Amino acid sequence: MKKIRVNTDGALREATVDEPALIHLDGNTLGLAGTRLQPVTDQPVVCVALNYAGHYEQLADTFSHPPYKEPPRQPVFFIKPRNTLAGHLDEIPCPDGVDRIYTGAGLGFVIGRTASRVSREQGFDYVGGYTIYNDFSLAEDSYFRPPVTTKCLDGYGPAGPYIVDAEEITAPHDLAISTYVNGELKQTASTKDLRLTIPAIIEELTEFMTLVPGAVVVSGFPPDRVAVQPGDEVRVEIERIGSLINRIVKEADQL
Amino acid sequence: MKRARVSIDNRIQQVVVNDDYSVVTEDGSTWQEDEITWLPPQYGTVFALGLNYVDHAAELAFKAPEEPLLFLKTPNTFTGHRQRSYRPDNVEYMHYEAELVAVIGKTARGVKRGEAMDYVGGYTLCNDYAVRDYLENYYRPNLRVKCRDSLSPLGPYIIDRDDIDDPHDLKLSTRVNGELRQEGTTRDMVFDIPFLIEYLSAFTTLQPGDMISTGTPKGLSDVRPGDEVVIEVEQVGRLINYVISEQEYFDERATC
């Protein structure tokens, strides 16, 4: 039984979840498989790019060439604004004229108290919980310009299904992340391969950005994102947290 | 009509702003510009434009883009009129950018440029400071340059769309300690407001309170702690900001 915070009606509420994925909330039991949940944050989400060892190495040869010219000296962050927020079981629209979109499974951590200029030694004190994030994206062929037209489509950042309290996750840098499409395993990774650890991300980010309680930061995305198309059901599973499920639909069918 | 969000005696409220920057509260009391704390007028998503003035792109040795260069700003970076922004220690070059901001008034998705101005609720100003030392070629301009705490003064207020004759024919300027440093006109925008609304609303839903910060003309220069930076857009208004040191900024925050 894990302590979680779940958003059923626009406000985060405390609940518990057990192994067959039943949420216990105010004496009621919800079957997670059939319960659409609201996003677990209302803040823009900050994500870390190029933060899995394998991915960085894949691209390392390109970094000395234009347009980059040299490897990154600083962590590479990007923003998913409020229109991208989505919840568990929300549908993800694939625009007309686009055949495939790409998944981006990542471990999100949730800020527990206001964080500004926090050192990595204190970083974990500011983590209130963890969630699952899926950074949906159109094909991205370059890291030169901010990924607005590829990553900021409506609903392209589902987070959830819920937030697991930080105390429940004793080893956040040793969690398996799996992406399934229509039940078939397509990608596996481990948070062991994060280049910047969670406390290091907090130090780097809060040097210039104050993070407020409830803000979600996504620690990174494993290489080889999975191509998906309308009709596909995408399930991201993170060990000890749970599964976040979203289905891809044609945008024309959703509007 | 000009509307602002201000704090008076620690109470946040909406006020109407007069031409002399005095404000009138809902209960009818009037306060002078320097008697209140000005807050950012909105906290929506800011879609900001890089290299959106031909002369500015040339100044930075770039050719004008064929597609809008978009980046986003986060709420931590917003501050209000007459507030303080900090210059990080040990940097070589931090500059202002005077920008006209279109504020979305109603939900926009799939809007064509012919109808786009119907979705503009009003205008405000942004001083889109940048710390060039932190630029690098990954998701450029990166967050450390454009999303730093305090470095996006917004305001002072939102002026109604219909109070502006033609948003694409307004003079912009920046004065530092009274000295004119930047001058241009919104006629020189590469991508105008209707184009940007069509472009953005093709893939994203623009929500009321979202903002499009339309870029800056040439005339960048370094600012230092102690500088008063005033950006002005004809008919819209002027936005004052004070540059302080990193130490002063964090000392002030610690005592708040």
Image: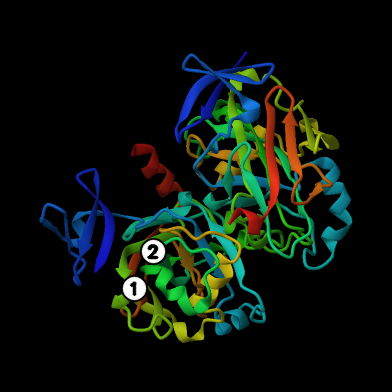
Q: Chain of mark 2?
A: B
- Mark 2–mark 1 contact, CB under 8 Å? yes
Report how many numbered discs are placed on residues in the image: 2
Give the residue pinned by disc 2: B105
Q: CA distance from mark 2 to mark 1?
A: 9 Å
Q: Chain of mark 1?
A: B
Q: Is residue A130 above or below residue B256?
A: above
Amino acid type of the residue that numbered disc 1 sits on in the rendered structure: Arg
Residue B124 appears in the rendering: no
Q: Residue furthest front?
A: A253
Q: Give the image location of residue A187, x and y in percent.
A: 84, 38
Location of mark 1 (residue): B161
The image shows residue A32 at horizontal and vertical percentages of: 62, 26
Q: Looking at the image, can residue A157 be seen?
A: yes
Going by the image, does A68 lie left or right of B95?
Answer: right
* Local secondary structure at mark 1: helix
Callout 2 secondary element: loop
* Sequence order check, earlier mark of 2 and 1: 2
